[in-house]
Image (spheres, rainbow, N blue to C red):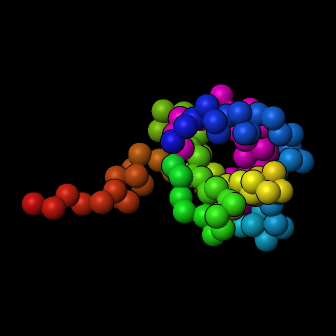
């Protein structure tokens, strides 16, 4: 996906330019053990953005992305967002940490 487009979309927003429901914020902080400050820092200043995956959105006016930020050599922060074009709003869907070890476990097996 187009990384400069996503960086431009995220850079022009402040912390209050993103919307998140209270139940999702609780889930991110307590179940996934990711601090919201870390999520805000990476979204408002996307220097560590390494990969973007586009996903089908619920509406034709929406764009859904899974954004990967590099925390260190082994750890990545994954944030799921939806961009609502008509309202010009970014909604945070989820955020969690992933490592190389979990990536290997999740990766699809090769067919022989």
Residue 31 can be seen, yes or no: no
Name the residue: 54% across, 63% down: 56
Residue 2 higher or lower than 85, as above or below? above
In depth, the one of 111 and 38 nearer the eye is 111
User: Please, is residue 85 above or below residue 70 in the view?
Assistant: below
Chief secondary structure of the magenta portion: helix
Task: Give the left or right position of residue 104, taking residue 53 as reference.
Answer: left
Q: Is residue 2 magenta?
A: no
Magenta-colored stretch includes residue 30 = yes
Most distant residue in the right direction: 16
Q: In x, y percent, where is residue 45?
A: 74, 32
- Residue extending furthest left? 112
At x 79% / y 57%, what residue is drawn? 86
Left or right position of 109 against 101: left
Of the 4 image quadrants, the one containing the C terminus is bottom left
Residue 51 appears left or right of 6: left
Residue 14, x across and y down, in percent? 86, 40
Q: Splitting the image into 4 quarters, where does residue 33 fall?
A: bottom right
Bounds of the magenta span?
28-52
Q: Residue at x 59, y 39 (%)?
A: 69
Image spot of residue 55 (x, y percent): 53, 58
Q: Is residue 24 among what the camera can see? A: yes
Where 69 sits versus 101, above or below? Answer: above
Against 70, residue 64 (above or below) is below
At 30% from the left and 60% from the top, the residue drawn is 108
Q: Is residue 15 left or right of residue 54?
A: right
Total residue callouts = 0
């Amino acid at each position: 996906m187009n990384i400069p487009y996503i960086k431009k979309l995220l850079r022009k927003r402040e912390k209050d330019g993103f919307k998140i429901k209270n139940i999702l914020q609780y889930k991110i902080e307590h179940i996934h053990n990711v601090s919201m400050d870390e999520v805000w820092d990476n979204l408002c200043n996307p220097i560590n953005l390494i990969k973007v995956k586009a996903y089908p959105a619920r509406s034709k006016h929406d764009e859904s992305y899974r954004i990967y930020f590099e925390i260190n050599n082994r750890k990545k922060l994954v944030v799921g967002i939806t961009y609502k074009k008509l309202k010009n709003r970014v909604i945070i869907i989820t955020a969690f940490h992933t490592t190389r070890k979990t990536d290997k476990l999740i990766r699809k097996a090769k067919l022989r």
